[in-house]
Image (tube, grey):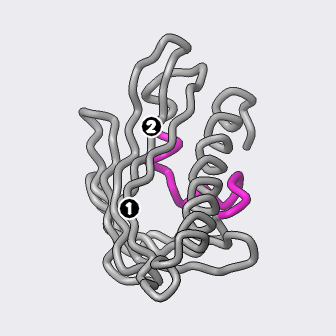
Amino acid sequence: MTIAEQVSIRGDKKKVFEVIRNMQSFPSFMQYVKSIKIAKYSPTKYISDWHIIIDDVPVRWKEEDIINEDNLAVDFRMIKGDYLKYKGKWEILRDSRGVKVKITVDIDWGAPAFTNFEEVKRILLRKTRKAFKGMLVAIKRKIEHKVR
């Protein structure tokens, strides 16, 4: 299933990109993100270990992050973890209010016994959207209100 969320931010595209690219700082200002550790680093590629908690449910994965500074984007894909599939993209785009930050994720929770039931699927989708929206709102607050 593909999920896309976005938020408009009053700010500079490059500054917003720096916040996103510095993902290991996310736990300091994002409620759902408990830890991100960079296991391997180069200027254009990270291997990162993520630990998030969504409604008291811990989720962990290791991902490859490809940093595209020219396009102000980060492509990511899960290498291993709690999902069957998890890949997507952070994009920084221009909009009428300044900058639009968009995250698009292709996710497979890997539990067909649950996702075959429409009500359970709706709940998973709602919780996942809430988490991504929460991440975007946290970035917006950090940029607009200069949160540490």
* 70 with respect to 29 (left or right): left
Disc sitting over residue 1 in the figure = 1
Amino acid type of the residue tagged 1 in the rendering: Met
Q: Residue 120: give its label.
A: none
Residue 48: % across, % down: 42, 70
- State the residue at coordinates (73%, 59%): 31
Q: Which residue is mark 2?
A: 17
Q: Main secondary structure of the magenta part?
A: helix
- Percent x, y of residue 135: 61, 50
**Crowding at mark 1 (Cα within 10 Å: few <14, some 14-19, many 20+):** few
Q: Is residue 131 magenta?
A: no
The image shows residue 50, relative to residue 112, as above or below, that is above
Which quarter of the rendering shows the N terminus? bottom left
Query: Dot 1 lies on which element?
Result: loop
* 22 inside magenta stretch: yes
The residue lying at 53 percent from left, 42 percent from top is: 19
Residue extent of the magenta highlight: 18-32
- Amino acid type at mark 2: Phe
